[in-house]
Amino acid sequence: MAMRLVVPHQDRPLQPPAPDRVRRFKRHLIECLRELRKARRPDRLIQALVVPVAADVVPVLVAGCTACRGFCCLGGGEHAYIDERTLARIHRDQPALTGRGMIAAYVQQIAPRSFADSCLFHGETGCTLRADMRARLCHSFFCSPLKEFLRGAVPADEVTVVPGPAGWDGGRVPKVTSPR
């Protein structure tokens, strides 16, 4: 039985990041680094790896995220969901990287043009931040329609993904519908 999967959608304009947004992001990273330094056991801040999804569902997830254009990224603002847990993982993986070096590595990857009032790394073709520097949430979040698909019994090759109306968050209309 073929299914139509309606995903959230955003259509905000692209714009260069305002200098005050970049400053707020740097301040956020400095605060996260301070919190990390306060931690008695920074290694305990590191979250478990995200369990990968089955290979056969990846095309549907990619199609869903492509059609959506990053509605979930809109909440990333000047923090990009990065916190001391993310920085603890980066410090573990790159122990020679100093706090200043970490801040510089993040700032260098800010999208030259990002979607208005969205995550600073939310660029025209997706996330401009290297995957190993992203917050765990960025690797594990699925919108309600995609979660419903992952819980369902519909084979991936029978799913058609379509974007919902611009600004729709995926929660007020049926997420999976049968085609007419």
Image (tube, rainbow, N blue to C red):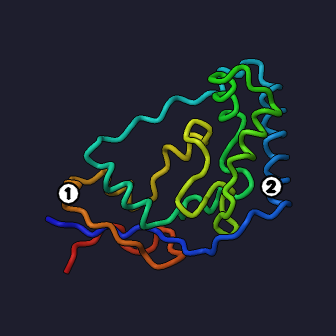
Instruction: Give the position of the C terminus as an image quadrant.
Output: bottom left
Which residue does the image show at 64% across and 67% down from the upper left?
Answer: 115
Split into 4 quadrants, where in the image is the N terminus? bottom left
**How far across and down, in percent of the image, does residue 139 sit?**
50, 43
The mark that comes first in sequence, 1 or 2, is 2
Label disc, if present, on residue 68 of the rendered structure: none
Q: Quarter-wise, where is residue 118 in the image? A: bottom right
Front: mark 1 or 2:
2
Where does residue 171 sit, x and y in percent of width and height? Answer: 46, 68
Amino acid type of the residue that numbered disc 2 sits on in the rendered structure: Val
Q: Quadrant of residue 3?
A: bottom left
Residue drawn at the location 45% of the way across and 73% of the way down: 172
Left or right: 161 in relation to 23:
left
> Mark 1 packing: few (<14 Cα in 10 Å), some, or many (20+)?
few
- Residue that lies at the very extreme toward the left in this rendered image: 1
Q: Secondary structure at mark 1?
A: helix
The residue singled out by tag 2 in the image is: 22
Q: Secondary structure at mark 2?
A: helix
Q: Residue at x 84, y 60 (%)?
A: 19
x, y percent for residue 129:
61, 46
Q: Amino acid at mark 1?
A: Asp
Quadrant location of residue 5? bottom left
> How far is disc 1 from disc 2 in space, using C-alphas?
42 Å
Relative vertical location of residue 61 with respect to residue 136 in this rendering, above or below: below
Q: How many numbered circles are shown?
A: 2
Mark 2, residues whose alpha carbon is within 10 Å: few (<14), some, or many (≥20)? Answer: some
Compared across the picture, whether 176 is left or right of 85 comes to left
Name the residue tied to disc 1: 157
**In contact (CB < 8 Å): disc 1 and disc 2:** no
